[in-house]
Structures are given as structure tokens and as C-alpha cells.
Image (cartoon, helix red, strand yellow):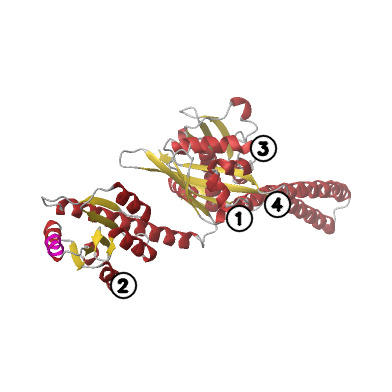
Amino acid sequence: MADEDRITVLYVNDDPQLLDLLDTQLRNEDPRLDVVTAETAARGRELLDDVAVDCVLSDYHLEASNGVAFLRDVRDTHPDLPFILFTETGNETVASESIEAGVTDYVIQKAVGNQAPLLARKITTSVEHRRAQREAERTDRRLREIVSVTEQVLWVFSADWSELQFINDRHEALFGQSTETLRDDPASFLERVHDDDAERVQVAMEHASGGEPQVVEYRVEKSDAVQLWVESRCRPIRDDDGDVVSIVGLSRDVTDRKVYQHELVEKVDQLEEFAGTVAHDLRNPLNVADGNVRLVADEHDHERLWTALDALGRMDALVEDLLERAREGERVGERQCAEFAELITGSYENVHAPGSSLDVTGSIALDCDVTRVMEAFENLIRNAVEHGSSDVTITAGVLADDRGVYVEDDGPGIPASERERVFEKGYTTAKTGSGFGLAIVERIVDGHGWSLDVREGTDGGARFEIVVGDA
């Protein structure tokens, strides 16, 4: 038997015969029990200082004292040590005093019969309960030590969100709200959520209570001058019967990512506008110069004129190349041959959307900038997860005649009246995110010389078709 399974019991009784009898009976009843005995409360107190005792069993009538007085003395130094009072009387005053002093259990001694089985059960139950509590406290301390170094908020709520069971100190930094306030009113964090996002967060909470893992992004207003974007991921915890008993999750600040997406699109727009202006302003004088030189060359066949025309032609080619590079905006770099199935699977793993699923039905080789194409696929997958339920099914496959590929989901879909607008910067049908995800997808597809279209999916969700032509 392992040492950690053994239970040391201190039995105090001023009758040596009863000490010996119950000692023997308890050991015979449960081999885990090691009994140390004392005939006085004073000796029992000494043994508590010398021996690692798991439970105290004390008679009420003791020489020069009584069990309740001994109990009070023990509680001064061992406030949670299991203490069972074993007495011949059922006096209500004794019972009341024992409970007030913090007794763990109270057993009436019978004149005839072996009560060792009952006492053994009460002793082991009390000790195992205390050990479980201490292990839970150790686990809680270790968990708090671990989460104290993370930048994310780790939290655990009851299944109906009415009780906050655990949260680390990062909540206050992220939400600008004390953990005490949240513990007193677990729903109070919704007061920090932007009005336009609150309903979506509440829907996600309801789905989580129903057993569905969730990923949701929303704005948090810490003060009048500070607004953050927060991403929360949660998973329901079930008991042995399959019922949801709690919700565990992580929340993190994703403001930088949102700002980066916004700035990226703005910079690309500025570059395109600049390049278009430069190209237009240069081409006009180039056309004038080219036309006049050609007129002179028609009348005077001179080598220098043809040299000038060649230089003007190279300048026109440079302007065209500048415009093309600006339109691509570094979205498309060196291309290589890659299998669509591998690209979409890798993109799905990068998004990390627990609860969802990916079904790849076919594959073709794509000549592409792998990094940029995976970024586009990640945005399509993230769009499906954020605009549908967390258990959304994503299907990816090949268009007829291998002319391209598609990515579709079984979510709510996109109304026909909105499909022309979904690629506009800042537009989103679910009021979530910055609205740049699909705009970036369109830019990457255009940069490859491909075309992108959105349709209704097989199961009514959104279907994005990418036609790659000869790719």
C-alpha cells in the first residue's frame, strides 16, 4: 500500500481498555488506518505536534477536560483537521457546542455492538474529502502561477454564466474592470462590450451553454478614449452524463492585428492611386514626345531619332511595369507549384477553429505565391467561422474542368443583394472584424491574375469560387 494512501488517526480516551479495543477494531476494519492513542487531552495535544495526524477521534468524557474543550484547542492550530467526537451521550447541549466549535462529525457510542465500521467510514470519508480539497487548492495555486505570466485572460464560468468560477488577473488590464466586480456580477463584463457587438457576444454565450465551442471578436470600451478589439475562444466542459457544467475560455487583445489589416489595405490603396497618377502624368508627355519624334523620323531618317524612339519605348515599358507592381502591392512574390489540398489544409490548421471541420473533396496544382494564397484561404476560413456557428463545416474542392477551386461553408450564407459589396473595404454582414478580410482575398486573387466570385453554397452557405484559368 502506498504511503500516501495510509491514514493516521489520533484516538483520545481516558479508558485504556476502550483505547485498545477500538484501536484493534479500526485496524481490522480498514488496513489503511494507523491508530495512535492518548489517554488525556494534554497527551493528545503533544502527539499532534509530533505526528502527522490525518484525523482526530476523541471521546467526550476525558480526565480533567472534555472532548469539546480539546476540540477548541485543536482548532486553534489545525482549523481544517477532521475531528470526530465519540461519546456515550446524545445531549443536545454537547452536540450544539461541538458544532459551534467546528466538529467534523458526531457519533453516539452504543453500549453493545461494534461501531468500528461506522467510525472507519466516517474517518476515511472526512480524510479523503480534506485531501481532495488540499489537492484542489494546490492545483488552483499552480494554475494561478502559470496564468499569471500569460498576456491572455483565462476564465471559467458556470454553464449558465451565472457564476464566475475562475479568472486570472489579466481581466482587469484588458477590460478595465476589477475581478471582484465581475465575480459579484458575472454578466457585468457585457457592459464593457460595444453596443453594436453585445448581441453577437450574447449569442455566442448561448451557443457555448448549448455545448458548441465558440470564437468571437468584439470591441471593448475601457473608457471614453480607449477602445480595444478582443478575441474570445471558449469550450464547454461536460460531466460524465454529457451535460455542460462549465465554460472555459481565453480572451486576448487583437487590436494590433485589426489596425495592421486596416493600414495594409490603406497603404495598398495609396500605392495604387499614386502609381495610377504617375503613370497617367508620364504617359501623356511620353505620347507627345513619341508622336513628334516619329513625325520627324518620317521626314529625316536619322539614327539618333530611332535611338530616341527606342528610349521612349523603354520608358513606356517601365511605366507599365511600375503600374503593374503597384497593383500587386507585394501580394504576389515568387511563384511555385503547390497542391490546392495541401494549401487549404495548412491554412485551416493556421486559423485554429475548434469545433469546425474541413472536408477537402479534390485537388489541383496551383502556380502561385504560396504564402499569399494561404493568407487568402485563411481569411475565407476565418470568414466562415466568424459569420457562422463555431461548428461550421467548410468544404473545399475543384471546379468543373479543373478551371479553378472553391471554398464553401454550411453557414447562414450571403444574401444575393449583398454579394457585390462583400469585397469592399470595411464591409461586413455580421458587424464583426474590420471588414478587410475579403478585401484582402480579392487583392491576392487579382494579383495572381485570377478571378473571384461569391455564390450560394451547396448547403445554403457562402461559396467562393476562384477561377485560375490555365493554372
Question: In this rendering, which labeled residue sits more in front, label 4 or label 1?
Answer: 1
Q: Of callouts 3 and 2, which one flags the residue occurring earlier in the amino acid sequence? A: 2
Q: Of callouts 4 and 3, which one flags the residue occurring earlier in the amino acid sequence? A: 4
Decide which of 394, 112 is in the foreground and name it.
112
Q: Is residue 141 magenta?
A: no
Return the mark for residue 19: none
The span picked out in magenta is 17-23
Residue bearing mark 2: 49
Q: SS for tag 2?
A: helix
Q: SS for tag 4?
A: helix
Q: Of callouts 2 and 1, which one flags the residue occurring earlier in the amino acid sequence? A: 2
- What is the C-alpha distance between the residues marked 2 and 1? 45 Å
Q: Could you tell me the amino acid type at mark 4?
A: Asp
Q: Which residue sits furthest front?
A: 64
Residue bearing mark 4: 321
Q: Could you tell me the amino acid type at mark 3?
A: Glu
Question: In this rendering, which labeled residue sits more in front, label 1 or label 3?
Answer: 1
Q: Of callouts 1 and 3, which one flags the residue occurring earlier in the amino acid sequence? A: 1
Label 1 crowding class (10 Å Cα cut-off): few <14, some 14-19, many 20+?
few
Whether residue 131 sits left or right of residue 355 in the image: it is left
Residue at position x 31%, y 72% from top?
A: 49
Whether residue 207 sits left or right of residue 454 in the image: it is left
Whole-percent x, y for residue 110 in the image:
16, 50
Q: Of callouts 4 and 2, which one flags the residue occurring earlier in the amino acid sequence? A: 2
- What is the C-alpha distance between the residues marked 4 and 3? 26 Å
Residue bearing mark 3: 424
Question: In this rendering, which labeled residue sits more in front, label 2 or label 1?
Answer: 2
